[in-house]
Image (tube, rainbow, N blue to C red):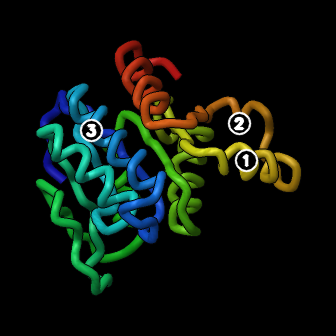
Amino acid sequence: MESKSEEKIVTIFGGSKCSEDSVEYREAMDLGRRLAAAGFTICTGGYLGIMEAASRGARDAGGRVFGIVMNQFRSEPNRYLTDKVATNHFYERLQNLITRSVGFVAFKGGMGTVTEISLVWNKLQTGVLERRPLVLIGDCWKNVVECWHQNLVVSRDDISMLHFADTAEQASKIIIERSKVNII
């Protein structure tokens, strides 16, 4: 994925199965629009649902949108991408979604979204990635993370690396504020 060195990329994760009339779709569209208007490039997995909504919102605001797609998938990428990066396997796709981003936002999704969040969070915990915001948006995440804390080896310090937001407005403010001062 080619990008300008000063370009600020935010990766947005989320499920592919939400419909255009769902709250999540509208919020992801709003988030893409807000971040693009603030000068961020949006990066998604490139397909439907949350990925399409965030891409669509960013394009509506005149923003640049990277879609990291997989050659193995038979479905077509969404039409709102400005740049498409084709990968051959999941790990390569995940690396492309993660390595250039100054922040991450995750909406509700399935096991793919959980995998993406887990990998980003682990890279932040281990210092493989410098600190940057990982925002979980929506009311489902606090319960999920609390369940992980109760049943897995997830400490309160680990959880303190996460940011929680109820709306696209809140999530965009976290990303914008944290990227300006480079703090988590």
Q: Which residue is mark 3?
A: 33
Which residue appears farthest toward the front when viewing the image? 21
Tag 2 secondary structure: helix
Q: Which residue is mark 2?
A: 159
Tag 1 secondary structure: helix
Q: Kindly report the distance in space between the C-alpha atoms of the residues bearing marks 1 and 2.
A: 8 Å
Q: Are marks 1 and 2 in contact (CB under 8 Å)?
A: yes
Residue 136: x %, y % from top left: 56, 42
Q: Amino acid at mark 1?
A: Val
Q: Residue at x 21, y 53 (%)?
A: 66
- Location of residue 161 (image quadrant): top right
Residue 150: x %, y % from top left: 87, 49
- Say whether disc 1 or disc 2 marks the residue closer to the N-terminus: 1
Residue 141: x %, y % from top left: 66, 47
Residue 23 versus residue 146: which sits nearer the camera?
23
In front: mark 1 or mark 3?
Answer: 3
Q: Residue at x 25, y 46 (%)?
A: 57
Q: Residues within 10 Å of mark 2 (few under 14, many from 20)?
A: some
Q: Which residue is mark 1?
A: 145
Residue 95 versus residue 50: which sits nearer the camera?
50
Q: Amino acid at mark 2?
A: Ile
